[in-house]
Image (cartoon, helix red, strand yellow):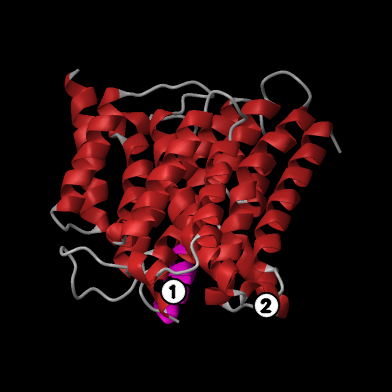
Amino acid sequence: MLRAAVGIGLYAGAFGASFGAVAVGTGLSVAQTMVLSLVLFSGASQFAFVGVATAGGSPWAAVPAALLLGVRNAFYGVALARTLESRGLRRLVTAHFVIDETTAMALGQDSARAKRYAYWATGLILFALWQAGSLAGAVVGTAVDPADFGLDAAAPAVFLALLWPSLRMVEARWVALSGAAVAVVLIPHVPAGVPVVAAAAVAAVAGLGRGRGSDSVRSTAAAPIDPATTTCSQEAR
Amino acid sequence: MTALWAALVVAAVGSYVLKLAGLSLPESVLNHPRVQRVASLLPVAMLSALVLVQLVDGGGRYRLDWTTLAGVLAAVVALLLGRGLLLVFGVAIAMTALLRLVS
């Protein structure tokens, strides 16, 4: 698990470097770049902010673009809330690391304890390397293009790998397929960020519409002895 | 403070508030069985949507780079063979980088 977290951190570091290089290359100062990485800390939102803010119009146009991409983190928070059990002041710290990668790593673990460990390990390692990468990219600039190393294939491959164990269940497969289909159909029609959030509606329909659950929790023959993943363990309670 | 700085701070703080909002639903709501069921399905629906969006979204238009697709398909093969995250990651970027090098 820790190796996987380090691996994700390293790839985030490479993306952080490309973010830093792009941000400074399009006119942000190093300080502005680092405030985005440290405080906004959500890759897709950061790229969107820089892209819109430096496109020539008012920088305020970048705010909704960045926040639309951040809405999905609110939904991730709902999914993680019970597992992370963070209250009071601690929640203020926990919230900062609610992003795609930490949610996906937590999703892939079986017990609540392992989910918490995955969340924090991934969150802290990724945060550190994201900052290091951003700073390096901002200072050094575009010395290398991440696309040359095939890194743009890394993100979908990594998220697919993290999602994979959950897809053992028939219901989860349908939810995954439907969610992906809804998002893909919406891409040309709505602003960036909305397609992924719209997929949440599929989870809502599947979760609210079907009260039973026990018959939809059947594992496939490929993994007969695997412990329950998220959906199973939630429904088994 | 320039407009760029102001917009930047608003976006950063707003993004944090969104993260905090999701974690801050009252426990009575979170403990509701229906909410739990939806919550458990949310990451599956949204992350699978994210995978496809990352693959085919070219800024509000469909754009599929065949070398990226080949990398992700190689990752699927590695996953079907039961390989772990790091190998899947390595296979994906190696396949895509190699195809870009030769094409």
Amino acid marked by disc 2? Glu
Amino acid marked by disc 1? Glu
Is A114 magenta? The answer is: yes
Please say if B102 is above or below A44.
Answer: above
Please say if B66 is above or below A35.
Answer: above
Chain assignment, label 1: A
In front here: B93 or A25? B93
Which residue position is annotated with label 2? B27
Chain assignment, label 2: B
Judge left or right: residue B4 versus residue B56.
right
Is A28 magenta? The answer is: no
Which residue position is annotated with label 1? A235
Residue range in magenta is: A112-122
Residue A6 at x, y percent in the picture: 36, 61
In front here: A146 or A70? A70
Residue A109 at x, y percent in the picture: 36, 70
Please say if A86 is above or below A7.
Answer: below
**Same subunit under labels 2 and 1?**
no
